[in-house]
Amino acid sequence: RILANNPAHAIYNGKLFLAWEDGIIIKALDYEFKELFTIKQPYQKQKFREEDKKEVMEFLKTDPSTKDILEFLKPIEFPEYFPAILFITVTGDKLYCITFTSDKQKENYETLLFDLRGKFQKKISLPILWEKPLKPYPLNLYEGKLYQLLDNADTEEWELHITEIK
């Protein structure tokens, strides 16, 4: 089952922020796993389209880690919708929630900012680049910047791309 379980988490200042439910629902827990509060934010579900299925299947058929075992993985089940949350992190006293909601070119992803009490602040757009279907290149946010480690196929070297968050 593709994207059947897509939990996201962040740890900051003695709190665990955990998202595993359907929708933009992030629970803040203390060090004893006592729930402190829950962040809930409405969002527009993103359809998992035929093009997405074809892209994933092509990857599974050609990637060295899956091509030889593809028959054993069948039947492959695709979701009707993408999960709401791709990634969460906390930095600079803000919780960043990167969603699967993107522009038409799938280059900029809607990101929701919350304060550390769970109050919604604003939406921004971040350029997230993908290594493989359903797997972004390694990324993190820190002190107002998006850091993403990208594989440059031409030079065969890894490059650190830094984008200022506005």
Image (cartoon, helix red, strand yellow):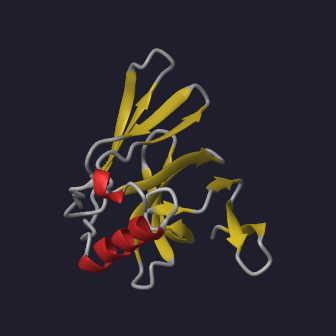
155 lies above or below 119? below
Residue found 30% across the figure and 57% down from its top:
71
Could you tell me which quadrant the C terminus lies in? bottom right
Left or right position of 141 against 44: right
Residue found 75% across the figure and 81% down from its top:
154
In this view, the residue in front, 164 or 45, is 45
Left or right position of 141 against 66: right
Residue found 37% across the figure and 32% down from its top:
37
Residue found 50% across the figure and 76% down from its top:
108
Among all residues in the image, which is located at the extreme bottom? 105
9 lies above or below 148? above
Q: Position of residue 89 (x, y in %)?
A: 55, 47
User: Could you tell me if residue 47 is visible in this image?
Assistant: yes
Q: Position of residue 139 (x, y in %)?
A: 62, 57
Left or right position of 10 against 37: right
Q: Position of residue 107 (x, y in %)?
A: 51, 78
65 lies above or below 119? below
Residue 68 figure quarter? bottom left
Q: Position of residue 46 (x, y in %)?
A: 28, 69
